[in-house]
Image (cartoon, rainbow, N blue to C red):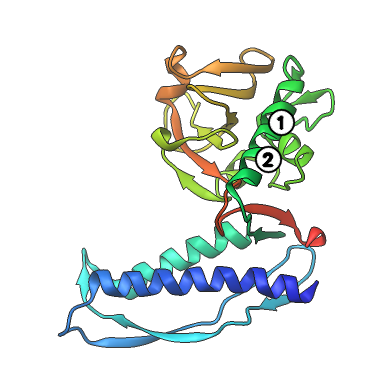
Amino acid sequence: MNLLKNTLLSVIAIQVLVLAQLSFIKYSDNKSYANFLRASLFTSTSSSKQKLPLVIQTTFFLPKKKILGSSITEQLKNEIKSLISSQLSSDYFALLYKSKKEEEKICKKIEANAKKLLGVKYVWGATGPNKFDCSGFTQKVYKMAGIKIPRNSRAQAKVGQYIKYENLKKGDMIFFDTNRKKIGRVNHVGIYLEDGKFIHASSGSKKVVITNLDKKRYYKNRFLWGRRIINNDIRGLHLSKSSV
């Protein structure tokens, strides 16, 4: 198990290093001065204070060149921090899916599981099995497919890969700001199906429903972003530590 755990974490470390190299190539020039940034990454679980060191530690060059008032070093640090927090937040570990076919199979399973809950009553704070709020519904649907995600919508909105509206695919989580005054803060979540439709536990409808974003502009106008945690790359499935 430790070997598998280290392998998974190593894959993420490699992605970070690639990101670093791409950033260097994009922003550096022959006259740039460089400093060192040591990548020594780890995660810790909420259930224990144990730190899990990555098996890869490296040093790479970063330019000091200023862009928009902040150094590339700081920009890269922020990108790495965002990447690590999305992949290794709380008790979650990234697992590599090996085939597109396997990805599609999981997406279909999520759609089927979600539709089984159509009509189930909406109750704020509920997590099932006979009533749900929006994030309780998404958590339950993914759990039925063997995927563990955080409990509330704001935490769910930080897991996985950021997806724009035009790139949404079946199985993606989609997030909204339904506050009276739009402030860009997540407070509603659903699961994208296809053709502009998504399924969610709606406080307005008082139950789990399917909504067409193109026909109900309210939700489309309040859409923030999507998150993809089912993917055939290293931003893939998130499982609890105990499952690894």
Q: Amino acid at mark 1?
A: Phe
- Asked if residue 90 shows in the view, the reply is no
Spot occupied by residue 212 in the image (x, y as percentages of width and height): 51, 16
Relative to 173, is 66 above or below? below
Spot occupied by residue 137 in the image (x, y as percentages of width and height): 71, 31
Q: Residues within 10 Å of mark 2 (few under 14, many from 20)?
A: some
Task: Decide if residue 233 is on the left or right side of residue 124.
Answer: left
Relative to 91, is 14 above or below? below
**The label number, if any, that marks residue 195 in the structure image:** none
Q: Residue furthest left?
A: 31
Residue in view at x 40 percent, y 84 percent? 60
Q: To which residue does mark 1 refer?
A: 137
Q: Nearer the viewer, residue 61 or 183?
A: 61
Q: Quadrant of residue 167?
A: top left
| Viewport quadrant of the N terminus | bottom right
Residue in view at x 32 percent, y 70 percent? 23
Relative to 8, is 232 above or below? above
Q: In whole angstroms, how far apart are the C-alphas of marks 1 and 2?
A: 17 Å
Classify mark 2: helix, strand or loop.
helix
Task: Decide if residue 103 is on the left or right side of residue 146.
Answer: left
- Asked if residue 81 shows in the view, the reply is yes
Q: Residues within 10 Å of mark 1 (few under 14, many from 20)?
A: many
Residue in view at x 63 percent, y 82 percent? 55
Task: Decide if residue 207 is on the left or right side of residue 48.
Answer: left
Q: Amino acid at mark 2?
A: Ile
Spot occupied by residue 20 in the image (x, y as percentages of width and height): 39, 73
**The label number, if any, that marks residue 106 in the structure image:** 2
Task: Decide if residue 105 is on the left or right side of residue 187.
Answer: right
* First along the sequence among labels 1 and 2: 2
Q: Quadrant of residue 241?
A: bottom right
